[in-house]
Image (cartoon, rainbow, N blue to C red):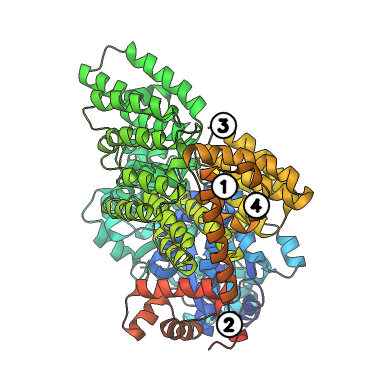
Amino acid sequence: MLMQQHILKRSHIFEEFNNIFDYSMTVAVAAMGYGKTTSARDFLDEVGAKYTWVSMESDESSPQYIWDSLSRQLSKTAPELGNQFRALGFPVDAPQREKILKIIEDYAYLSHTVLVIDDYHFCHSREFDRLIERIVRSRIDGLHILLLSRTVPELNIEELKLKGYSYMIKNSLFEFHRAEIKAYFKLYGYTLSEDIVGQIYDVSEGWISAVYLIMQRYTEINKVEPGRSLERLIETTVMSRYTDREVHLLKSLCILDSFTPQQAVYVTDDTNTEKMIQKLSYGNSFIRYDDIEGVYRIHNIFNNYLRKLIEDGSSDLELEKLYKRIGQWYVNNDNMISGLKYFLKAKEYDLILEQFEKSHINIVFDRTPKYILEMFSLIPMEVKYQHPIGFLAFVGFYVTNVDKESGARHLAEIEQYYQNEHNISPALKMRIFGEIKLIRAYIDFNDANLMREKLKEAHEILKGSSFIANKDKIITFGSPHSLYLYYREKGQLLWTRDCVEEMFPYYMEMADGCGKGFDYLLHGEYYLEIGNLSEAELYAYKSIYKAKSMEQTSVIICAQLTLARASAAKGKFDEAMEIMDDLREEVEMCNSPILSSAFDLCAGYIGGITEKETSFANWLKLGDMGQSEVLYQGMGFNYIVYGKYLLLKEEYIKLEMLCEEMGQVFASFNNMLGYLHTYILDAVAKYKLYGTDKARYSMLSALEIGKLDDIVLPFAEYAVYIEEILKSMEEDMDKDTYFDKLMIYVSQYRNNLKNMRDQKSTTPMLTNREKEILERVVEGKINREIASDLFIAEVTVRKNVTSIYRKLEVTGRASAVKKAMEMKII
């Protein structure tokens, strides 16, 4: 039996690790087996630091996979952090990165938290490296990152060191010196002569793991064997103690960097595995059980040795069979990304396509599109054709989420292939052509008439049930306004509403309830645009009620924006912002980058009305449309909200230039509401830059669209900017009932906005409950602890915290505490 390893206290290493608390990031670099992991953990325990430990589990270049692995580990040790990370997914754009930074800031703001990432050398993702750099450069109060790596990470280490962000601990620090070798053997009861110490140093060269193995061998033969390599030391000291069956088990499990007992049993397909691994780990420094995470880990040195045996061919393992079982374990335990990765390693392409046939695959498509595209490109074409439903599910995703033109070409090739394929049943062939017809409806997006006809045909062929469309499909494509997507002809707003409403039931039934409440939403948005606020609210509430029954968050987002705009139109601006607060909570729980961007647009839209700059996400403030996850069908709406931000900031030259670009953007789908906002924004920009005459031309174009469909609310929402322009046009609009009606709306909205400005207080008005919660936030308590203190639900705490942020005009806990103290609110 191997002897349990003792820890030698090394003061000079402790002194170096003390620097952790002076820098945003510390990087400890040493080759495998030099004890950096043990030293770091021992130091953090010794000083009583609050730390969270995660490990890179294997060589990986996919940032999505790395993120999934680390967040799952965090969910066990720091659930309030890990669960939120898992919910958001890897931050692929600026809005998501800002959310991640806010989560970390809230977690670390009142205590020195050390985030340890072990085995960072396994990271081969430049995207993940950039995220780490972004976090480090943010200098989040209370957060200190410790990277443990065998090689210098591919970060801008020298620049980060130069600017005071980072500190480096180098390899030489971890080497055992002669005096330490002597002290280490003393821990095990051996007093060595200087001569023997010298022999050990010459053999080990200060390598701690080698010293440990030499010590194990020394206890057996009472001498030092010169010329022994590490592999030979492991063979004689470790492997010789194991039976053939135990060696086979260890080789099977070394593929995994960590594993639960249940996972080990499943992967090896042996019910005795749990008892065997428990026996092997007892008193063994090379196999350890982590009580906190509930997993076993094989030490890197031993793990690498075992893997080398496999690579050298000295193993009877069926690797691809093992990879397959590992993949099946992950899929069965709700870890689709890891499962697909191991299926790919096993070359189990059929199993990958089978996963694509499952109903929840659309969630995976939406969260990790880049990973899915890369993986799908590696699957042989002949295998894709053997799984028509999985293949078509991917093409459906490609058409709606990536590129409909190239997707249409793929679809044509698939259709031709199956037309000439005679070795499939008539029922399956009919199913294939029905799904193809459904995807063609996606391709005809924005032409409501064509979509209606194709959806009707698909519904008939598929007998009302699709295998590739389901309730997880985002029916709004991330747009916060559904009618905006389809309204493409002047004077046809009502017709568009009715046509889309007619096609909707076909799709909803085929997709098992996808878009539930969408029909009521169409009515609510229609009534909102024409200024019938009571009907707009009625249908929006109906839409939300229906949508909640099928968890249709995309529909809820649109309906809540309708309600918020209606509230603002009534002069209830606080109510509009509270609606956004509640919506934020709902969207953050969805783990959808697309819906997160949709919410950003809602918040920015209402922020433009209520003159709240803090309501705009950073990517919208920058006008960086490439950071939006809204799908291409709704991408134009980004420009409307960015225009509102430029208006708020009075950047009229930028706004005029933006309007030129907006005209081209909305031409893609001929979005009438897009054009309407463009003309209004352009009129304001020209009025501010050149005067009334230049502004009138653009305003006339807006009025032409508005009049044909009796649209009034968008004009009213710009009331403070356009009232003077409209007044200058009154003589030309004599006896125009639409214009007269519009002026009434604009005038009333302007008065409401004036009242809002007059009522603004220099000190935020927090409720008593909000003050109670803020006091506990200052104390460093998390939401769960605050809820327990006040005997209220955690969701109530979250809503109040969000309201506090809005009233203080901040974005996180740290900034809220700072602002509250500055204003002496508490």
Q: Which residue is mark 4?
A: 727
Which of pointers 2 and 1 lies earlier in the amino acid sequence? 1
Mark 2 neighbour class, 10 Å CA radius: few under 14, some 14 to 19, many 20 or more: few
Give the residue type at disc 2: Thr
Residue 190, position as x, y percentages in the image: 50, 80
The answer for how far apart the CA atoms under marks 4 and 1 are is: 30 Å
Compute the Cα span from label 4 to label 3.
33 Å
- The residues tagged by marks 2 and 4 sit, at their Cα atoms, a distance apart of 36 Å
Q: The residue under label 3 is which amino acid type?
A: Ser
Label 4 amino acid?
Lys
Vertical placement of 503 versus 244: above or below? above
Q: Residue 796 at what x, y percent from top left?
A: 36, 74
The residue that disc 1 covers is 638
Most distant residue in the front direction = 735
Image quarter where the N terminus lies is: bottom left
- Classify residue 81 by image quadrant: bottom left
Please state which amino acid type lies under the numbered disc 1. Asn
